[in-house]
Image (cartoon, rainbow, N blue to C red):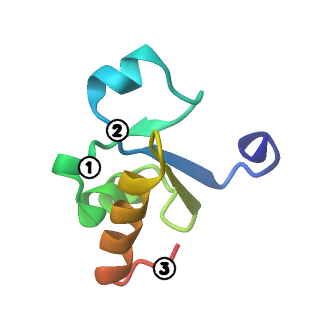
Amino acid sequence: QLMQVNKNLVLIDVRNPDEFEKMHIPNAVLHPLPQFSPENVMQQLSEQGLENSEIYVTCASGKRAEMACQLFYAENYPN
Protein backbone atom coordinates (compact mmCIF):
# COMPACT_ATOMS: atom_id res chain seq x y z
CA GLN A 1 0.00 0.00 0.00
CA LEU A 2 2.85 2.38 0.76
CA MET A 3 4.15 2.07 -2.79
CA GLN A 4 0.76 3.03 -4.20
CA VAL A 5 0.60 6.14 -2.02
CA ASN A 6 4.26 7.14 -2.17
CA LYS A 7 5.69 7.02 -5.70
CA ASN A 8 9.13 8.01 -4.33
CA LEU A 9 9.44 4.77 -2.39
CA VAL A 10 11.89 2.04 -3.38
CA LEU A 11 11.58 -1.49 -2.02
CA ILE A 12 14.78 -3.55 -2.02
CA ASP A 13 14.58 -7.30 -1.48
CA VAL A 14 17.87 -8.73 -0.18
CA ARG A 15 16.91 -12.41 -0.33
CA ASN A 16 18.51 -14.92 -2.70
CA PRO A 17 17.32 -15.04 -6.32
CA ASP A 18 15.54 -18.40 -5.84
CA GLU A 19 13.58 -17.00 -2.89
CA PHE A 20 12.72 -13.89 -4.91
CA GLU A 21 11.55 -15.97 -7.88
CA LYS A 22 9.24 -18.06 -5.69
CA MET A 23 7.55 -15.00 -4.21
CA HIS A 24 8.19 -11.30 -3.85
CA ILE A 25 6.39 -8.05 -3.25
CA PRO A 26 5.31 -6.43 -6.52
CA ASN A 27 7.77 -3.75 -7.71
CA ALA A 28 10.47 -4.94 -5.29
CA VAL A 29 14.00 -4.83 -6.69
CA LEU A 30 16.31 -7.75 -6.02
CA HIS A 31 19.73 -6.98 -4.51
CA PRO A 32 20.89 -10.22 -2.80
CA LEU A 33 22.71 -9.60 0.46
CA PRO A 34 25.86 -11.60 -0.43
CA GLN A 35 26.51 -9.13 -3.29
CA PHE A 36 24.86 -6.13 -1.64
CA SER A 37 26.58 -2.80 -2.15
CA PRO A 38 24.91 0.43 -1.00
CA GLU A 39 27.05 2.35 -3.48
CA ASN A 40 25.81 0.21 -6.39
CA VAL A 41 22.20 0.46 -5.23
CA MET A 42 22.43 4.23 -4.98
CA GLN A 43 24.12 4.46 -8.39
CA GLN A 44 21.26 2.51 -9.96
CA LEU A 45 18.68 4.67 -8.19
CA SER A 46 20.49 7.80 -9.34
CA GLU A 47 20.41 6.58 -12.95
CA GLN A 48 16.63 6.23 -12.60
CA GLY A 49 16.21 9.64 -10.96
CA LEU A 50 15.30 7.98 -7.65
CA GLU A 51 18.33 8.92 -5.53
CA ASN A 52 16.17 10.92 -3.10
CA SER A 53 13.60 8.16 -2.67
CA GLU A 54 12.57 6.66 0.61
CA ILE A 55 14.19 3.19 0.76
CA TYR A 56 12.67 0.15 2.40
CA VAL A 57 14.59 -3.13 2.66
CA THR A 58 12.89 -6.50 3.01
CA CYS A 59 13.74 -10.18 3.34
CA ALA A 60 12.07 -13.29 4.78
CA SER A 61 12.60 -12.69 8.49
CA GLY A 62 14.11 -9.21 8.77
CA LYS A 63 17.65 -10.29 9.67
CA ARG A 64 19.18 -9.81 6.20
CA ALA A 65 17.25 -6.57 5.77
CA GLU A 66 18.73 -5.33 9.04
CA MET A 67 22.24 -6.21 7.85
CA ALA A 68 21.64 -4.36 4.57
CA CYS A 69 20.40 -1.30 6.48
CA GLN A 70 23.53 -1.41 8.63
CA LEU A 71 25.61 -1.35 5.43
CA PHE A 72 23.66 1.71 4.24
CA TYR A 73 24.28 3.49 7.56
CA ALA A 74 27.97 2.49 7.59
CA GLU A 75 28.36 4.19 4.20
CA ASN A 76 26.38 7.27 5.32
CA TYR A 77 23.23 6.67 3.29
CA PRO A 78 20.44 7.69 5.70
CA ASN A 79 17.42 7.09 3.41
**Percent x, y of residue 38:** 30, 64
Q: Which image quadrant is residue 69 in? A: bottom left
Q: Residues within 10 Å of mark 2 (few under 14, many from 20)?
A: many
Left or right: where does residue 72 sit relative to residue 24?
left
Residue ID at (28%, 27%)? 17
Badge 1 amino acid: Leu
**Percent x, y of residue 32:** 27, 42
Residue nearest the observer in this picture, 5 or 49: 5
Q: Which image quadrant is residue 45 in? A: bottom left
Residue position marked by numbered label 3 in the rendering: 78
Q: Are marks 2 and 1 in contact (CB under 8 Å)?
A: yes
Residue position marked by numbered label 2 in the rendering: 15
Residue nearest the observer in this picture, 47 or 37: 37
Q: Secondary structure at mark 3?
A: loop
Residue position marked by numbered label 1 in the rendering: 33
Left or right: where does residue 35 sit relative to residue 41?
left
Badge 2 amino acid: Arg
Q: Residues within 10 Å of mark 1 (few under 14, many from 20)?
A: some
